[in-house]
Image (cartoon, helix red, strand yellow):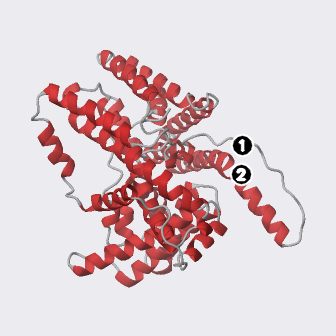
Amino acid sequence: MLFPTLNFALFFLVVFSLTWALRGRHTLRLAVLTAASYLFYGFWDWRFCALLFASSAGNWLFGRLIFAAPDQARRRLLLAGALALNLGVLAFFKYFNFFIGSMNDLLLTLGIGRDLPFLAVLLPVGISFFTFHGISYLVDLYRGTLDRPATLLQMLLYISFFPQLVAGPIVRAAHFLPQLRQPVDPADIAATRAFLLILGGLFKKVVVANQLATGLVDPVFHDPSAHGAVDLLLAVYGYAVQIYCDFSAYTDIAIGVAALLGYRFPQNFDQPYRAAGLREFWRRWHISLSSWLRDYLYIPLGGNDGGWRRTRNLMITMLLGGLWHGAAWTFVLWGLLHGLLLVAEHHLVGRREIAAGWGRVAAVAVTFHCVCLTWVFFRSPDLAHAVEFLAGLARFDRPSEVATPLLLALLAGGLAAHFLPRDRLERIEDWVVRLPRTAQAAALGAAIVVIDRLGPDGVAPFIYFQF
């Protein structure tokens, strides 16, 4: 069930009405939200719901055991077992055939002609996200960030809550579970901001991301050899804008939908292409994932513990971050490149920040193009396509065959939006709330109609659904 569809609109209207009608009956409201979340997830494949429930119930049980353990050694042992189980399930569903295929290739290279068996494993939608949510709960409980375990109902809802279930943001247990312990208050809902986030997300996804995908990015990346350097370069820039608009659109809509139900999600994007360095980029891009990797992987490994250990920790973190995105060597190489760039930045720049002036302008341009280079591997179906794509950037014997005024305008607008004032949403919100209610409703309806008319036919899945 995709956000920009009539099915989801009707689903959410029913859930919104029913849950607010039950606001005086807190436990029943949580139960209804949980049931709605399982219905939402089962829309893709009802069999996924069994895995989702098993993950939630298993982590709930381990959490209670960790909390009740009599000593630190027992707590640590239980945590290690729970983490191994979570990561084992993720590895089986997402990486089993990848590792088997890689091993087969290695055996063939060594002259050992043995085919290891593949399994017909169906990848559950959003498994990477709900696995990380489960790990967050266990580690937060182990560290004492959570003062007590969740109830089974709270745990089921935390893991399955439909706005963030399949593509984030990754909402930490210590942030979300306390919200489930008390009744929601309609007075705390910033409804205008929520609707603005949803409308902005719809525009970024339906108009910008989908138009760039169908008109520019997909045709060029499908067959790089059929295009010259101009189209290839436009496709790289187009994909940079597409993936940002696609993913930030999902999280904007998720944040807005959750807010209308009475819950707060953290910000997930902060104009990442205005970053003046890779470290700053990762503080602005997919913030919930980058901060998760920092706090649950990089720092436990030793963090900035000087010298080669910092390099080791950065490389491990970024390689695993790349592999988290997908079971392919292109994602591993994407993570490797980001790790190498971060290590180089640490050695060249140290802890200094580029504050302002032309130096920052140059740093933003260099950072953006480094990120775009890595996007080539992220988007390409395999390494051979990526190499072919990069080689084509030196082929200036063909004019552009895909550029249109609309696509160029969307590309330029998508990049320029990163340099708008950071309080732009608050400014728009202040202006909208001054309008009469009827004018607000009319503007909302008109915006939805315009967005629908400007988008291409059909509704494309969000990019991060595959992760």
As drawn, the residue found furthest toward the left would be: 434
- Residue 464 rendering spot, x and y as whole percentages: 50, 48
* Marks 1,2: beta carbons within 8 A: yes
- Residue 202 rendering spot, x and y as whole percentages: 36, 41
- Residue 102 falls left or right of residue 22: right
Earlier in the chain: of badge 1 and badge 2, it is 2
215 or 330, nearer to the observer: 215
- Residue 189 falls left or right of residue 98: left
Location of residue 405 by image quarter:
bottom left
Residue at the image position 27 percent from the left and 76 percent from the top: 361
Residue 250 in sight here: no
- Residue 319 rendering spot, x and y as whole percentages: 56, 65
Q: Secondary structure at mark 2?
A: helix
Which residue corresponds to mark 2? 96
Q: Is residue 192 above or below residue 201?
A: above
9 or 89, nearer to the observer: 9
Residue at the image position 51 percent from the left and 68 percent from the top: 232
- Residue 77 falls left or right of residue 167: right
Q: Which mark is residue 121?
A: 1
Could you tell me how far apart the alpha carbons at marks 1 and 2 are, in whole angstroms?
A: 8 Å
Q: Amino acid at mark 2?
A: Phe
Crowding near the residue tagged with mark 1, few <14, some 14–19, many ≥20 C-alpha atoms within 10 Å = few
Residue at the image position 66 percent from the left and 69 percent from the top: 384
- Residue 438 falls left or right of residue 121: left
215 or 89, nearer to the observer: 215
Task: Please name which of the two marks, 1 or 2, marks the residue nearer to the observer.
Answer: 1
As drawn, the residue found furthest toward the bottom would be: 348
